Amino acid sequence: MNELLKIKEDALSQIEACPDLKVLNDLRVHFLGKKGPIQEAMKSMKTMAPEERAAFGQVSNEVKQAITAAIDEAKVKLEAAAINQKLAEEVIDITLPSFHVHEGTKHPLTMIEEEMEELFLGMGYQIAEGPEVELDHFNFELLNLPKDHPARDMQDTFYIDENTVMRTHTSPVQARTLLSAKGKGPIKIICPGKTYRKDDDDATHSHQFTQCEGLVIDENITMADLKGTLQVFADKIFGEGREIRFRPSFFPFTEPSVEVDISCFSCGGKGCSICKQTGWIEILGAGMVNPKVLDMCGFDSKKYQGFAFGIGLERVAMLKYGIDDIRHFYSSDLRFLNQFNRKDS
Ligand code: FA5
């Protein structure tokens, strides 16, 4: 019994003097563990008389409980002390000058894209998406460009394999949207997105660029609807008072097809260096959806007609912001990008 009480006294004084949680844990293992002094003392119970054994057992339990309680209490104190010490060490000096955090700006292409989305959503369009790694079937064949069609040369293509390409334009989304509508109009979508062509990079060409496709399908849609829509687009993006004109062109997926020019926003049509003295700037390709495309994509071309257009967004941004080289968009040069702070535009 005396031995037990001595163990208790020894344990309690060591626990009280314990400097940190690690030592406290070592004390717990030592005093309460299987090879500890209490267990050792309890071995003598084997030789005790039953009443003595019961009394000894009771005292040893009390000693264990007292040590456990002292350890728990010390643990709470030491934990609090450790937190306080950590907080004291980590005091924040609020007088230190802060790091300057540079505020990002939106990329000019993102700004144009968002402006267009806002405009067309306001006119009841929906935004469609399609894959950038596209099947030849959607990029060409369903757009009336069968294999070996000479018009395929109009777009120099990155082939992944015989049947898979990096999409050369956003027009495959037309085919995908028509097919998923299962022959039932109306459809009004735009699709902004990345496009790829094996063009050599220069001031006006990039091997990766951005287009925004537009597609409207319904009964009784005419070229006048296309012209009215593009007039609204020109007014909104380039400012009121822009005139637009259609020039005959060719795309296999539209018939008739047009190139669309807007009157020069810089000289108002008189002629300047931006419009190469013509008074007009070409901004997009468009046309009435070729009935063959409608038929191939499950629409009754006798009942439905529609128009489509494809705008090069770098071209629009270059004109709108007076950017002279398309490569600026992809250089990640902060001196260029920081000029486009949305708050000022
Ligand atoms: C097309 O891509 C047609 N899919 C557009 C279309 C859609 C016509 C729907 C009719 C109906 P085009 O190859 O002309 O057309 O390209 C459209 C625009 O993409 C061009 O006016 C130009 O602004 C831009 N573009 C084409 N190639 C490049 C290039 N390498 N770098 C930057 N912009 C380019």
Image: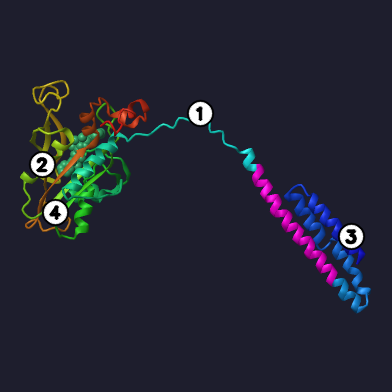
User: Which amino acid does the dot numbered 2 rest on?
Assistant: Ser
In the rendered image, which quarter contains the N terminus? Answer: bottom right
User: Which amino acid does the dot numbered 4 rest on?
Assistant: Leu
Please say whether residue 154 is visible from this viewpoint.
no
| Residue linked to disc 1 | 97
Q: Does the magenta stretch include residue 140?
A: no
Residue at 76% of width from left, 47% of height from top?
Answer: 19
User: Which amino acid does the dot numbered 1 rest on?
Assistant: Pro
Q: Identify the element where label 3 is drawn.
A: helix
Q: Identify the element where label 4 is drawn.
A: helix
Dot 1 and dot 3 residues touching (CB under 8 Å)? no
Q: Residue 318 at x, y = what percent?
A: 23, 29
Q: Which mark is drawn over residue 257? A: 2
**CB at disc 2 and ligand 1 closer than 8 Å:** yes
| Residue linked to disc 4 | 294
The Cα atoms of the two marked residues, 2 and 3, are separated by: 104 Å
Dot 2 and dot 4 residues touching (CB under 8 Å)? no
Asked if 16 appears above or below 112 in the picture, the reply is: below
| Residue linked to disc 3 | 6
The Cα atoms of the two marked residues, 1 and 3, are separated by: 59 Å
How many residues crowd around disc 3 within 10 Å: few (fewer than 14), some, or many (20 or more)? few
Q: In which quarter of the image is residue 257?
A: top left
How many residues crowd around disc 2 within 10 Å: few (fewer than 14), some, or many (20 or more)? many
> Disc 1 or 2, which lies upstream in sequence?
1
In this picture, residue 207 sits left or right of residue 79? left
Q: Residue 84 at x, y = what percent?
A: 65, 44
Residue at 85% of width from left, 69% of height from top?
Answer: 59
